[in-house]
Amino acid sequence: MSIYTYQEKLWLYERIGRPSKDDSFYIYRLLKRNGETYTTNSNGIFFDIDALSDDTLKDLMLYYRVLQPLIEDRPYYEQD
């Protein structure tokens, strides 16, 4: 039984959506490191969010709540 609720997993699913290349690489490394089941092909990486361990979900939540917003492209504003 997971410590994460359906709503938290749904939020994560919506955030992942269509991941960028960098996000896909991070997710792939995370799933591989934690021994999760996944498949890959030329269209990306595929996995079942509901089957992920709590540790993997915790790491993904941390990435999408904290780390990704810090590394997203920021628009450049010219100073006058």
Image (cartoon, rainbow, N blue to C red):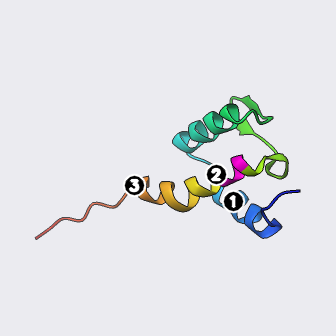
Residue depth check, mark 1 versus mark 3: number of the one nearer the observer: 1
Q: Which residue is drawn at 42% across and 57% down?
A: 70
Q: SS for tag 3?
A: loop
Could you tell me which residue is drawn at 64 percent across and 59 percent down? Answer: 15
For the view shown, which residue lies furthest in the left direction? 80
Q: In this view, does 15 lie to the left or right of 75?
A: right
Q: Where is residue 75 in the image (x, y as percent from the top left)?
A: 33, 61
Residue 56 in view here: yes
Magenta residues?
55-59
- Locate residue 37, reporting x and y percent: 80, 35
| Numbered mark located on residue 73 in the image | 3
The nearer-to-camera label among 3 and 2 is 2
Q: Which residue is drawn at 72% across and 57% down?
A: 13
Q: Label 2 sits on what residue type?
A: Leu
Q: Is the magenta stretch mostly helix, strand or loop?
A: helix
Disc 2 designates what residue? 60
The picture places residue 56, in percent across and down from the top left corner, at 70, 46
Pointer 1 or 3: first along the chain? 1
Q: Mark 2 Cα within 10 Å, few/some/many (few <14, many 20+)?
A: some
Image quarter hosting the N terminus? bottom right
Query: What element does badge 2 sit on?
Result: helix
Which amino acid does the dot numbered 3 rest on?
A: Asp
Residue 43 seen: no
Q: Give whichever of discs 3 and 2 has the lower sequence position.
A: 2
Q: Does the magenta stretch include residue 18?
A: no
Gap in Å between the C-alphas at discs 3 and 2? 20 Å
Closer to the camera, 64 or 46?
64
